[in-house]
Amino acid sequence: MSWSLLLVQTLNGLQFGILLFLIAAGLTLVFGVMDFINLAHGVQYMLGAYFGASLAAATGSFWLGLLLALPAALAAGLLLEFLVFRHLYDRDHLAQVLATFGVILFVNQGVKLVWGAAPLHMPIPPLLEGGVEVMPGLQYPIYRLAILAAGLAAALLLWFLVDRTRAGMLVRAGATNPEMVSALGVDIRRLFMLVFGFGAMLAGFAGVMAAPILSVEPGMGDAPLILAFVVIVIGGIGSIRGAFVAALLVGLMDALGRAVVPDLMRLFLAPSSARQAGAAIASMLVYVLMAAVLAFRPAGLFPVRTG
Amino acid sequence: MTTPRLDRRQLLATAAAFGLAAPRVARAQAQAVRIGFVAVLTGPQAALGTQLRDGFQQGLRHLDGKLGGRPAEVVVIDDELKPDVAVTKIRAAIERDKVDFVVGVVFSNILQAVFRPVTESNTFLISTNAGPSPFAGRGCHPLFFATSYNNDQVHATMGQVARDEGYKRVFILVPNYQAGRDAVAGFKSRFQGEVVDEVYVPLTQLDFSAELARIAAVRPDALFTFMPGGLGVNLVRQYRQAGLANIPFLSTFTVDEATLPAQGEAALGFLHAAVWAPNLDNEQNRRFVRDFEAQYGYVPATYAAQSYDGAMLLDSAIRKVDGNLADKAALRRALEAADFRSVRGNFRFGPNHYPVQDFWLCRVARRPDGKFQTEAVRKVLENNADPHVGECRMRPA
């Protein structure tokens, strides 16, 4: 494998990691601050993509679509919180898992009723079309670099909000000791709603950004959700910094694993079985990483709760 | 249990849609032919099932809601792409709704699950899409017919194309499951050059950038891929964005009318092998495509065309036996005769009840009205029988 190929795969990994981070950030906050398992978080990502694709088609502009999709995703998140999730905070995890799984089925089906079962198409904005030639014959799409930049900007913004503002301080405090925060006179319900809506919007943002390169279809949020859970478990539940590092780790592991493992297997297996075994092992790598991290640091890389 | 109620409602809705609920039929005593139509109508692959169902209903519409002169009633069954669900629902359709035929089925794994329950109840099973190899060979059955194809043939068609075009080095990219491995075997059965690399990706893959970088590094003469549904949408767009579109894109079940609305311009000029294309030039087909689009507002794919042929096949067979469905042997002979005009032109059944037909190389094109469709470029295989027919020992009628 050449250096340029390695560079491309690293870029791919980072870009996938950034998308994962946008989804996982909301998830880890909701899980960490509210101790609420929200399986329906992937649905927010899907809704973001659908809002983005249909609003972009209606307005004829990617940017307007993106701009309008964010409040729409926020509203959808708050609506779900108000209708369903709010009634689950005091229940145990099993009830939360069951109810939010129900929400996944419900919304996936609802999306199909509204937009139909066929995948939607969202074009890349003209400004970000084209690519940079990173190795002979392979264009690296500018749009993917833009995703990388937008994700990093979102991560910075998030760091600022959580680390440097009063609301962020409350969120951090809530993640460590919710009872104490509540006893100090903070309306914890409102804080929860704020966190929830913001998490939903981030996932929606990831959805809009992913829409031009991935297929916008019912159930598209289910696969990233699983990886997002892996990310927050590796990173430490409730930790934004942990989610960021873990998302990049998972993204890199996934991309480089897929690139390198089949070649490695070829050293000691027949070519055709090496390809199939390599593919199987590459898709397991992320979970192996999770198991390894959990074995040495059961609370994740950046544990929040210490008591 | 809510399922039976749902089915009954669907039955009524379908019957009403064809105007069958109204006492318009003069001979009210003429008993209806009951069809259990199975398709996946929920989940990510629902677009394919919708095509399958709409194609069949368009067929019935052209037949004035009748099959062989008898009114038709359709019970639509959503298999949810879950074999156990499909079996339960189909058992109910056979035992409670007393369907005379089970028709449809998009995916091979569903067909394999329902095959025994249907045939053991002495009911005809007519697949309008799934065409797994076992039922074409050793497992062929007098009550089973396929109006589609055997999967191997479609992949082999692309292998033949690669050979005809003189491609020396081909890169293969498929999902890592049985159908993906079958695709590779089918392609290799006719391709004679070198396979520079075979890459297997998980069925849940979203991002192909790692594989695309690999393709760019190898610079093959052509890519062969089989990426059904959403997988294909992602691959096609990313392939175009990566600037690889100058490497010929040979595919099966990857760019068709079910996914083209989402692939759009990215798929322009990409190649695909099929038994049918919307632009096949025969009178049956022109009428089918025109009326289908007027009714449903989208371009039909092979799924719809094969289902439409399924309706025509049933109509011809029931007419041949004068509506007498009790004599299974006569009905079977009538089905074997396939005495109808297919939208594909050439069509007849081989001894294993799989079609002997032509296979086309198709290219994605934009129509004057801005919609995308696949267009037949040339006939690759003529009157082709599947490779398993020799293994079938069909019980004589």
Image (cartoon, coloured by chain):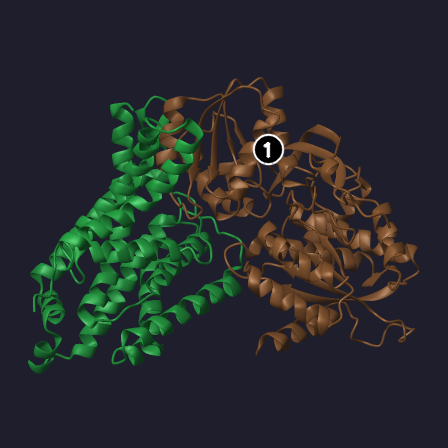
Chain colours: A green, B brown
Q: Which of A247 and B142 is in front in this view?
A: B142
Determine whether, in the image, residue B88 is placed left or right of residue A106.
right
Image quadrant where one finds the N terminus of chain B: bottom right
Q: Nearer the viewer, residue A287 or B40?
A: A287
The answer to whether any part of residue B271 appears in the image is: no
Determine whether, in the image, residue B38 is placed left or right of residue A59.
right
Determine whether, in the image, residue B366 is placed left or right of residue B144.
left
The amino acid sitting under disc 1 is Gly
How many neighbours does mark 1 have within 10 angstroms: few (below 14), some (14-19), or many (20 or more)?
many
Q: Nearer the viewer, residue A101 or B281?
A: A101
Q: Where is residue A169 in the image (x, y as percent from the top left)?
A: 8, 66
The answer to whether any part of residue B118 appears in the image is: yes
What residue does disc 1 label? B186
User: Where is B9 relative to B196, above or below?
Assistant: below
Q: Where is residue B76 in the image (x, y as percent from the top left)?
A: 67, 65
The residue at the point 74 percent across, 70 percent down is B15
Q: Position of residue B252 (x, y in %)?
A: 57, 37
Find residue A86 and report its image quarter.
Answer: bottom left
